[in-house]
Image (spheres, rainbow, N blue to C red):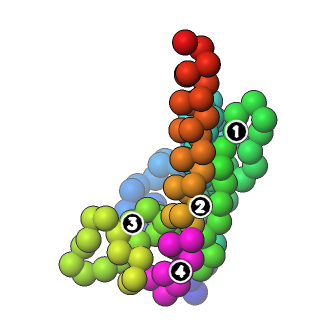
Amino acid sequence: MIDISYHLDLCKNVFGEGVYPVVNSTNLYYGGKDIAGSKIVFTNGSQDPWRHASKQVSSPNMPAYIVTCNNCGHGSDLRGCPQSPLVPEGNSKNCSSPEAVNKVRQKMTEQIDLWLSQCQTAGRSSM
């Protein structure tokens, strides 16, 4: 039966005894839920098993843009979907839902453009 025990045993066989995730240390190193940065784009694919490890809520003191790509897997917002031969720029046409990938990419671009325009405005007013 393939269950959690199967996967734990597989990891022990591959990596040996005593190799366990150190979640607290990882959260401390990377900031956990209190990431020390602002104006970061977080995209979460609805089919991405890592989506729960991503930031889910923006806060006023550290604004982030959080968007979900429906029917997308891990990283498909940036690299498109698996393809052969590999296309580094990520062709969304190979995705099962290319319109979802393109929509998220457009939203990301618009948000980054907004942030950049705010920086330019702030920079001019301080001169």
Name the kind of residue labelled 4 in the image.
Answer: Glu
Marking on residue 99: 4
Marking on residue 63: 1
Does residue 115 lie above or below 52 as drawn? above
The residue indicated by pointer 3 is: 79
Q: Are marks 3 and 1 in contact (CB under 8 Å)?
A: no
Part of the protein shown in magenta: 95-103
Question: From mark 4 to mark 1, how far is it between C-alphas?
Answer: 27 Å
Q: Secondary structure at mark 3?
A: helix
Main secondary structure type of the part rendered in magenta: helix
Q: Mark 2, mark 3: which one is toward the viewer?
A: 2
The answer to whether residue 80 shows anywhere in this view is: yes
* Between discs 2 and 1, the one toward the N terminus: 1
Q: How many numbered discs?
A: 4
- Residue for point 39% across, 56% down: 15
Q: Mark 3, mark 4: which one is toward the viewer?
A: 4
The answer to whether residue 4 shows anywhere in this view is: no
Name the kind of residue labelled 1 in the image.
Answer: Pro
Q: Position of residue 1 (x, y in %)?
A: 58, 87
Q: Secondary structure at mark 4?
A: helix
Q: Position of residue 85 (x, y in %)?
A: 21, 78
Q: Let me know if residue 98 is in the magenta part.
A: yes
